[in-house]
Image (tube, rainbow, N blue to C red):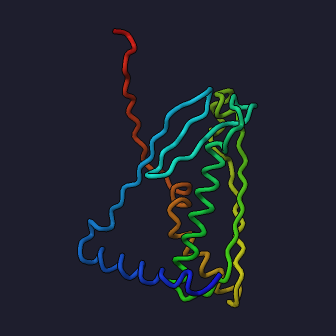
Amino acid sequence: MTTASVSHLTSVIDATRDAVSQDSANAHVVFRASAQARDAVASTVTLGKYSVEVDEPPALGGGDSAANPVEYYLASLLSCQVVTYRFWAEKLGVRVDDISARAEGDLDVRGFFGFDDAVRAGFGEVRVVVTLTGPESRERYLELQEAVDAHCPVLDLTRNQTPVRTVVETHSNDN
């Protein structure tokens, strides 16, 4: 990892601060995704100009042709952690030469299948390990972790209730 490869983050932070200070509406960003079902439980998800395949393992009715939704959640969490560590290291002046992260989560399928409504449908616990390499003291890296924990958007989605409103549209195949 070279310093030049992340040095542009300061200009991104400064430009965003300037744009938001001129008009707070510049802080509002909308992200969009759409999905199209295929096969038994698989889907193709479109994220802007990108698309990803999603499937389930055979034990959950899929063909195991792609990662499943909760694995994508773990990927989202880890990638958001990396981004947030980079931004906050730059903001705090903490040198980080390399970042790696891994996560695992425990899921009890009784909640998903409706076998026991007292069991959550999602993860009961997620464990994340972030490894930072660089010249700073452990205390400095723990200071960085506190900033990341307070500002990582995907971690925030997990730790705090986010309102989700679902609308079901129906189209009849009868003519």
Give the farthest residue toward the top.
Answer: 175
Q: Is residue 26 left or right of residue 52?
A: left
Tell me if residue 30 comes above or below residue 67 in the rendering: below
Give the farthest residue toward the front.
Answer: 49
Tell me if residue 66 comes above or below residue 126 in the rendering: above
Quadrant in the picture for residue 19:
bottom left
Q: Nearer the viewer, residue 124 or 76?
A: 76
Tell me if residue 75 comes above or below residue 134 in the rendering: above
- Residue located at (72% from left, 66% from top): 129
- Residue located at (37% from left, 16% from top): 172
Which corner quadrant holds the C terminus? top left
Counting from the top left corner in percent of width and height, residue 79 is at: 60, 63
Counting from the top left corner in percent of width and height, residue 63 is at: 70, 32
Give the farthest residue toward the left.
Answer: 23
Q: Nearer the viewer, residue 49 or 11?
A: 49
- Residue located at (43% from left, 44% from top): 164
Which corner quadrant holds the N terminus? bottom right
Q: Nearer the viewer, residue 13 or 158?
A: 13
Counting from the top left corner in percent of width and height, residue 94 is at: 59, 87
Q: Is residue 170 left or right of residue 62?
A: left
Counting from the top left corner in percent of width and height, residue 81 is at: 59, 67
Q: Is residue 136 left or right of residue 12?
A: right
- Residue located at (54% from left, 89% from top): 93
